[in-house]
Image (cartoon, rainbow, N blue to C red):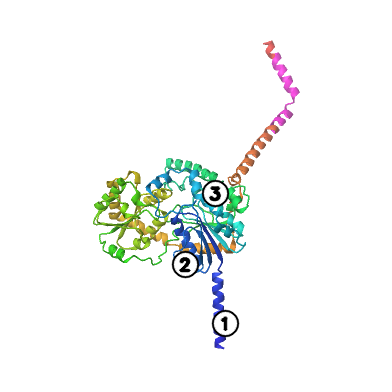
Amino acid sequence: MWSFKMFALFLMVLSSENDMCNCRKILGVFPSGAKSHFVMTGKLMKALAERGHQVDVIGMFPLEKPMANYRDIVLKTDKVVVFVDNVTYGDIQVANGLLKSRFVRTAGLEPCDSLGLPSMQEVLGTEKGIYGVIIVELFLAHCYLALGQHLDAPIVGVVTSKLPDWLLGPFGNHLNPSYIPSLFSSASQRMTFWERLQNTLMTNIITPQINYYMEAEVKQVEKYFGRKLSSMNDLYKDVALILVNEHYSLDDIKPLTPDIIGVGGLHVVDDDQQLTPDLQKWLDESTHGCVYFTFGSMVKIETFPEAIIKIFYEMFERIAPVRVLIKIVDPKALPPGLPNNVKTSLWLPQVAILKHKNVKLFITHGGLMGTQEAIAYKVPMVGLPLFGDQHTNIQSYANKKIAIALNLYDITADSLTNAVKTVLNDPIYRNNIEKMSKLFFDRPMNAIDTAVYWVEYTAKHGTVLKSPATELTWWQFYLLDVYGFILSSLLLTLYIIKMFITFFWKAICPRKDVKTYSNGVSNYKKTQ
């Protein structure tokens, strides 16, 4: 009898766990060659696998250690460059001068050509309905959204930056430039007249350009999927929701439809990352404080002009005995004269470093992933943005008094040293970032659990959160047809009133009376 009860209880628990998990097969598609992007998307896919879902991950960065329920489908192509410790100072100069056409080609059209690779062709041949949901990184390679209809699965988009201007409209959200800065604007939400003017021009120039050049992906969708599109907007209808790397504590306050879910800091997970013994010892001995200096996973600082590196060296010397820990891919490429208070390393466990009590300042290029980690672990910053959204990120943090923003191309040893010493010594920066960190973590559910919940929600319910605004044309959305009808009706009403008055006047004053009156007046004038 007891054995039967235990067996029944076991079945109930097992049934309950199955109901809670409702595990599915999930496809993740991340064609970008930027490893910093995959920091967020990879974390999401691993979290889904840990919760029992079977995930297939298409991308450039396979796992170093295999894990259960996780299968890599590696995109190997010469067309898409993998950016890991190989971006030089010259590359940065080129990136800053890219035309929008080249920008879209590099980050959109070229990754879309990976659809022709054998590994992708195998995915395209997958039986419909096998995947419960498909997760696609949204930046510029939106051709992959066609996988939704092709494999009969709802799409969840993931944006690893703030939501770009060109992704607002297709989901029923329109950027109001009076108080919402463009992705490429460094203005705050409280703008002067000139900032609003600049923001308005930027918003109305960049988005049409990006959309125009992205229309070339229509041909790629037709080529690889055999699907004819009237425009790229057809693909957005298959997107159930977007997970975006934003949170109100760091980013703009703006109205968004329910299918835009903020999961800012999703990758910021304390996964017990450990310091190496020598690094642990070095940081423990940095009793006067330590400055952590890195330009992320892509950039090689040692390729910068010697004049800039010498400015770094002078600042390092002038802040001693504070120590500096800096990521350098090839220390031999550095000019001579590196000060004694500096330690270099090819790779550094960033989260473990930022958590260390002696790390007092983060010198950064302003990448969103790294700066979110700094905020999470309460380390104020000095920013030297290089390209892309880094300028916006750093200026936003400077506006909030958790960082000082500098221009790399006109820094001096004095300006850099003063900025570093100010952040190190002025308690307002650390106090502000401590407050921001509390806001950043104060949520009903943490970012990774929020993301997993909405992925599972989409697998169950599809596109129920889509705004009806997405079904309207632009002229319907802005009520141009309604205002046109009202104006036409008003003009017609005025015309009818005019005609009625004319008719009424003629009825009261017949033409004959008018003619008699006119003749009388003429005769009177003749007699005078």
Q: Label 1: which residue?
A: 8
Residue contact between numbered discs 3 and 2, judged by CB atoms under 8 Å? no
Report the magenta residues as a range: 500-523
Q: Label 2: which residue?
A: 66
Per the picture, the main secondary structure of the magenta-coloured stretch is: helix
Q: Nearer the viewer, mark 3 or mark 2?
A: 2
Label placed on residue 169: 3
x and y percent of residue 304 in the render? Answer: 34, 48
Q: Nearer the viewer, mark 1 or mark 2?
A: 2
Q: Residues within 10 Å of mark 2 (few under 14, many from 20)?
A: few
Q: Is residue 407 visible?
A: no
Quadrant occupied by the C terminus: top right
In this rendering, position of residue 59 left or right of residue 86 = right
In this rendering, position of residue 418 left or right of residue 166 = left
* In magenta segment, residue 176: no
x and y percent of residue 342 in the render? Answer: 27, 56
